Amino acid sequence: MNAPKLADALRESRILHDRAAIDAAIARIAGELRAVYTISDATDSRPPLLLTVMNGGMLFASNLALQAGVDFEFDYLHATRYRGRTTGEQLVWLHRPQVSLKGRRVLVVDDILDEGNTLVGITQWCRDQAAAEVRVAVLCRKRHGRSVPCARADHIGLEVPDAYVYGYGMDFHEQGRSLPAIHAWEPKR
């Protein structure tokens, strides 16, 4: 089956959050992170480790790190349940961080908290690697009642409705990640 074209989707979409709203949300979370990570941690002198969840979290993580002004160490992971589809199954690891998480303060940064299965799997893996602390920052949280019970984020930028959302890192059938706004696809029936 051929994926719909981005140009067609844009005609059937509305902008939920423009670049100004996204920038304001990132600035707010950056302030929260400065407060969290400027507190001295006597147990570990290493900087906190920022783990970007690829591919969706890349734009958000980059801008968040620049705004926060925290001396993060960077690594990334690529774990997915979707693999180009709109529904997912078991978590598939495409890349695990190369830095040891043992005893580290870890910040996982992702694009969206939807049902939460992927983030729960990622955060549990971080804990299994003996991270001292695992926090989660997401650009968006989808409003619905289907989240797994332990799915949570410590820092949330924006709320989005229960719709197919894309842009600013989130994809529309692997397209549109570089759009500067967050869109909701509302196809005509």
Image (cartoon, rainbow, N blue to C red):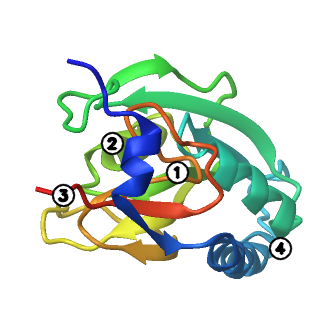
| Residue 10, image x, y percentages | 44, 52
**Dot 1, how many residues are within 10 Å of its Cα: few (below 14), some (14-19), or many (20+)?**
many
Question: Which mark is on residue 38?
Answer: 4
- Other-residue count near label 4 (Cα within 10 Å), few / some / many at <14 / 14–19 / ≥20: few
Name the residue located 82 percent from the left edge and 71 percent from the top edge: 40
Q: Which residue is mark 2?
A: 118
- Would you name the residue on which mark 3 appears? 188
Whether residue 100 sits left or right of residue 66 in the image: it is left
The reply to whether residue 141 is visible in this rendering is yes
First in sequence: mark 3 vs mark 1: 1
Q: Give the image location of residue 68, x and y in percent.
A: 81, 68
Q: Nearer the viewer, residue 129 or 173?
A: 173
Residue 28 x/y as whole percent = 69, 82
How far apart are labels 2 and 4 at the CA level? 29 Å
Q: Nearer the viewer, mark 2 or mark 4?
A: 2
Residue 118 relative to residue 62: left or right? left
Q: In what quadrant of the picture does the N terminus appear?
A: top left
